[in-house]
Image (cartoon, grey):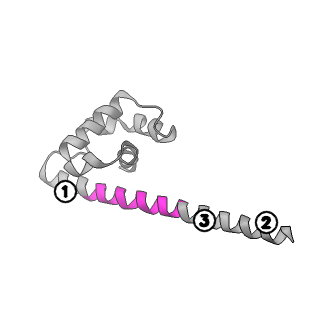
Amino acid sequence: MHRPLLAAVALIALFTGGVQAQTLVATSNIIVRALDRTFDFTSDTTTSIRDSKIVLAARDDAASFVASQGAIRGAQLEAALGTIRSRVPQAQHVSDQVLAEAILAR
């Protein structure tokens, strides 16, 4: 009697975990696409952020930051985050994690 109940609970837990993971991925994709549009708009109106030497130099730091889930924060990443936030007002309220992922996506 306990086995079917245990199996049902396990299936529900797996399904719920999968839905949460998909939601996180979808949310991240939406934010990255929005930032990409912002970066494209910025490149048309000011110096391109995606081609900025500061942002390009921060790719390794961004990779370390993302891989360590925010534990490793390099100086180049900090400079890039400041540059992005100063040039793109919409990025001021975006988390460092999302911006680091956007740097890597470029």
Label whose residue precedes the other's in the sequence (2 or 3): 2
Q: Which SS class for mark 3? A: helix
What residue would you read off at disc 2?
Answer: 6
What residue sits 66% from the left and 63% below the top?
13
What residue sits 36% from the left and 56% below the top?
32
- Which stretch did the figure color magenta? 21-37
What residue sits 24% from the left and 43% below the top?
85
Q: Which SS class for mark 1? A: helix
Residue extending farthest to the top is 75
Instruction: Tell me where residue 7 appears, x and y as whole percent.
Output: 78, 68
What residue would you read off at disc 1?
Answer: 41
Amino acid type of the residue tagged 2 in the rendering: Leu
Q: Can residue 99 be seen in this snapshot?
A: yes
Q: Nearer the viewer, residue 12 or 53?
A: 12
Instruction: Tell me where residue 5 appears, x and y as whole percent.
Output: 79, 70
Instruction: Tell me where residue 53 appears, x and y as whole percent.
Output: 26, 36
Relative to 75, say whether 65 is above or below.
below
Q: Can residue 50 be seen in this snapshot?
A: no
Residue extending farthest to the left is 45
Question: Residue 59's image quarter?
Answer: top left
